[in-house]
Image: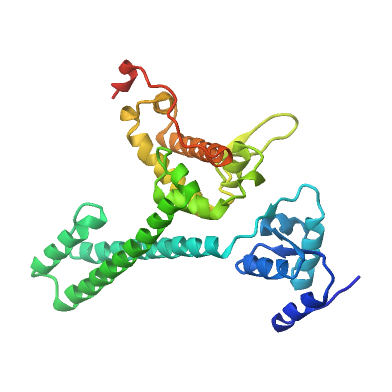
Amino acid sequence: MLRRKLHRSELVGFFERQPRCTVFLEACGAGHYWGRLLSGFGHEVKLIAPEAVRPFVKRGRKNDAADAAALCVAGTRPETRFVPIKSVEQQAVLALHAGRSLLVKRQTMVANALRGLAGEFGVIVPRGLHKLEELMALVSAEEGIPAAGRQAMAELYAHGRAVAERVATLEEQIVRHARQDATARRLATIPGIGPITASLIAATVGDHIGAFRSARHFAAWLGLVPRQHSTGGRTRLGGITKAGNAEIRRLLVLGATSMVWRATRWDSKAGLWVRGVLARRPVRLVTVALANKLARIAWALMTRGEVYQAQGRAPAAAATVA
């Protein structure tokens, strides 16, 4: 019916003049902004994840026009799942999480660089960010390190301290959101899910948990289900898919790791299940399996509007297993 190439400045005026229609957009960085804007004009806006559009791009013809045509095809497919449009408030909270994640990576980079430089002069301390102060004390006392080397490490240490302060500031705001948001408060009752993970899940999913038909669909969206290589009726499972939101998956795995290490003191059916699987499987596999279970529990709590209730208690003999 219509093919038109528009400059960014022409887009708003074009859609203002168009009768109400369905608009397919790729769920990219600015997709949610344009989704809110075009929805205000009365259009029905549907965001599609890039991985759902990629199979419909003609091979060897990757350009803007081909991407637009692929969006139209993908949007009309009955199996396509659309990405809910996030509100301004949701994106503001997610900006806090994105900033914190970036600064944590920078903090780790600085700490590793500082340890590496000190190690070249034979100065080594145990792992952990809290050990960097001890490392700098040893560097200052080491007479064999030239002044230029000590200055370089002092600059890195000062930069790391400044980054740590900014991380703490962002975490305070994230925890404040977790305490104010009803969904985040319910999620924080799950063992292994703290305020930062709860805030991220609440801000990412929000009130659109109904888009996932079951707990398994939610875990699959997070990439915590096995990758399949099945054919001829024979099921072959591999490692997890690692699809979907990588930051939520990473935080769930970290939370599951902390609970696995405390499994001997986890006095519930879930703790007994973890100890039973640990007796048969490697620790990392158990950690990912527990992260999958945490995602399913989170789906149940958000769907039903409930808080976590520990089911039963592990037998006393099992609780004392080392």
* Residue at 14%, 77% in the rendered image: 147
Q: Is residue 256 left or right of residue 114?
A: right
Q: Can residue 191 be spotted in the picture? A: yes
Q: Position of residue 318 (x, y in %)?
A: 34, 19
How many numbered dots are placed on residues in this image? 0
Q: Can residue 59 be spotted in the picture? A: no
Q: Is residue 117 left or right of residue 91?
A: left
Q: Is residue 71 left or right of residue 280?
A: right
Q: Quadrant of residue 296?
A: top right
* Residue at 37%, 21% in the rendered image: 314
Of 247 and 166, nearer the camera is: 166
- Figure quadrant of the C terminus: top left
Q: Position of residue 152 (x, y in %)?
A: 23, 75
Q: Is residue 282 left or right of residue 236?
A: left
* Residue at 77%, 66% in the rendered image: 43
Of 17 and 231, nearer the camera is: 17
Q: Looking at the picture, does residue 149 appear above or below residue 319? A: below
Q: Position of residue 33 (x, y in %)?
A: 63, 69
